[in-house]
Amino acid sequence: MARLGIDKDFLLDFARLDKPVQQKVSDTFAKFQQATHAGLHLEKISNARDDRLRTIRIDQFWRGVVLAPDHGDHYTLLKVLPHEEAYAWAQRRRVSVNSATGRIEIRDSVALDATLPELDRSARRGRGGTRPLFADVDATTLRRLGIDQQTLAFARAVTDLAQLETAQAFLPESQWTVLYGLAAGLSPDDVWQEIAAAVLTVSGPDEPVSPATVGAGAFDPDDVAAAVERSQDRVVLVSGPAELLEVLNHPFDLWRVYLHPVQFKVAHARYRGPARVTGGPGTGKTVVALHRARHLAAAGAGPVLLTTFTGTLTATLQTNLALLEAEAAIRDRVAVRTVDQVANQIWRSVHGAPPPLIQGDDERDLWKELIDERGLAFGDRFVADEWRQVILGNGINDLAGYQAASRAGRGKPLTAAQRSRVWAAVEAFEARLREQGVLTHALVCAEATRLLDQGAVAPNLFGHHPDAAGRRPFRHVVVDEAQDLSPAQWRLLRAAVAPAENDLFLAGDAHQRIYGHRASLRDHGIVVTGRASRLTVNYRTTAEILAWSLGMLRDERIDDLDGGLDSIAGYRSELHGRRPVLAGAPTPSDEAKGLIDVVRGWIDAGVEPAEIGVAARTNAVVDETLTALLDAGLPARSLAKPKPRGRKAGTGSQVAVGSMHRMKGLEFRCLAVTGVGAGQVPSSAVTPADEDPYAHALDLQRERCVLFVACTRAREQLYVSWHGAPSPFLTAVR
Ligand SMILES: Nc1ncnc2c1ncn2[C@@H]1O[C@H](COP(=O)(O)OP(=O)(O)OP(=O)(O)O)[C@@H](O)[C@H]1O
């Protein structure tokens, strides 16, 4: 039976076809896979640069382009195109094996050859004035990074970034990425690190790789079949018609089957303890968390918890897990829950009923009341945070423990007398809750942690645990959006899984922290030293939107969840598009009118309303904006209300309008962020500087991050508007 590989480009072509043609493509290749070599009707292409490229007939009009081996029956589907285009595409292309990564690469050899003389001429014309772009990188270094003879000639002639960007269309993708990385200021060693990660996945995640052990010459340049096997970032191998159909059924969800080498390595590695992946927005951290959960579930060592901080996010995780793993038995080994749901379930399993929770507003009122009664010189937010972060976050039970506790990250120092007064308020708060018979989420978390530590929780509470002796209900915990978990939640997660290989895996980005919780992982027994990785390629947002959004955070000092500082250096996107549009208006109604025109323009240009998002900082502005859009006759809905289901749902697609916080976990082709004026962003939720300068600075940073999160949900176009003066966060990047 023939073995089939499906190249990423093939799937993208397939996604754009009409349904009947898609059906013919599926039929052709389902049969193809069962055929023997002799029975295949692959046509040779005359005047081809690479005689391993063939075409296959799909119908009168459409052809598939297939990479056929010199011997054996391993085939890779590369393109589906109309007849003439398929031949023209295949005639110009050459397939090769990258000497540094051992993966396949495809170039437009004709375009590359045709460009070289012109580049040489233009370099000579500018001689004296222009320097070759890679003048400082010697040929040996370039070769070590996988640049071959033809690309080397190009690299020697290229003098500016625009030429390099144009060359993306014809250079082999992996070699172009190397050149682009160098042109963007990465050192050859930084570029090498990414290549090494790719090679690592070839030799096995646990084997150390150094430039001395791999590099030019390590792979057989003629063994294309072996190169295809290594290319999981662009070729998925399918082992039967059912698997083929499964891939073709979800042509847009590339993340299911093609992982960047670093993503693959991080998701599939064996870690001797807790591990962490960070990375800017859109770099695929959630994708990696999903693959990790699936990988661990498939291994079957025990229940896997896939968790995050809000129900909206767990709903998306659940949907995507179902897309990723077809087998229910494997999916069922993964419990997808918010951390609070885990705490509630543990509480209920021991106490027999759900925990009686106090409402958020009542909790705030109670703090205010107690602070007033005692004449404390602190605000209610400060005391409530002190309780959650320092006292519950460190599992402190008495005043002596609180007096001795580290308050790192809390800013304003407290004297012993002040700590005593805060402690008394906390005791009164907890006593009042007991009298009322209610709990906060943080208390449920703390109680669930205690129950776990006491061994009071049934080990099989979340699914069959083969090693129940450990008395911890999960064998693995995978956390997404780790930056927004509170210290008490970290304590719970640490207690829910026994320390062991592959116990905790965290994905997060402190630049996107929107709830201001700060936790140092090591303080909660989670040490990721030596097991931390970073993703740098953004798959969602264009380079223009990403660069502009990153500008907002340029001078911020952002932690790495582990006591160090994280850096935004090196995040990049290879997608290009328009720059963000910034629009100031004199009045609120002018701003609304501008927004309506922009949204209408997008819809008129063919963007589906459901592919459009509108974000604002406060619920009040969200409501006003929704009303304005609806009054203008545009289809729109609030993200705060669940999507209508069943008959009520109707068929129309609607623009999603929501708060910047609700945008987390979503993405839109076109996004408008509205109400970004001086009085509106940052919001009034910022602690005044004279009350607590440290809290003020942290609150401002959080507000900046909230705006950053909203803006980086845009895939293709971003529009940012305000009335009156713009937000100070915008003035820095305008
Ligand atoms: N290997 C991949 N191939 C194709 N698309 C990918 C890949 N990895 C991620 N994506 C896509 O990129 C987008 C962002 O991925 P994801 O949500 O996992 O990123 P993230 O790092 O969690 O983002 P954020 O931190 O901004 O929430 C998604 O549309 C996802 O499908």
Image (cartoon, rainbow, N blue to C red):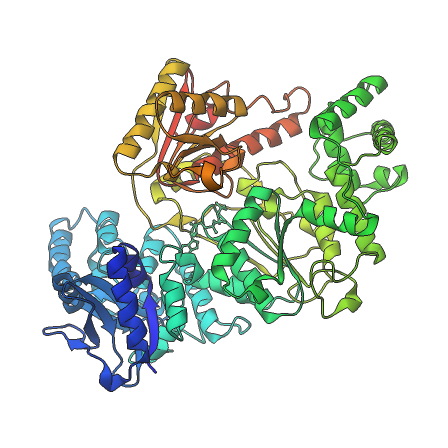
**357 lies above or below 349:** above
Horizontal side of 80 relative to 315 (left or right) equals left
What is the number of callouts on the image? 0
Q: Nearer the viewer, residue 173 or 300?
A: 300
Give above or below for 34 relative to 615. Answer: below
The residue that appears at 42% across and 17% down in the rendered structure is 725
Q: Nearer the viewer, residue 389 or 338?
A: 338
Q: Quick one: quadrant of the C terminus?
A: top left
Q: Is residue 187 left or right of residue 369?
A: left
Relative height, residue 693 to residue 264 (above, below): above
The answer to whether 528 is drawn above or below residue 200 in the figure is above
Residue 431 lies in quadrant:
top right
Residue 310 placement, left or right of 404: left
Residue that sits furthest to the front in the current view = 647
Q: State the image coordinates of residue 197 (x, y, percent, origin top left).
A: 46, 65
Q: Quadrant of residue 39?
A: bottom left
Q: Residue at x 35, y 44 (%)?
A: 542
Q: Residue at x 41, y 15 (%)?
A: 588
User: Is 628 on the left-hand or right-hand side of 106?
Assistant: right
Asked if residue 675 can be seen in this view, the reply is: no
Residues 722 and 698: in front is 722
Q: Residue 665 location in percent, x, y?
A: 50, 44
Residue 33 is at least partly visible in this image: yes
Depth check, front residue: 450 or 117:
450
User: Which image quadrant is residue 340 in?
Assistant: top right
Q: Residue at x 55, y 72 (%)?
A: 206
- The image shows residue 500 at horizontal and vertical percentages of 70, 66
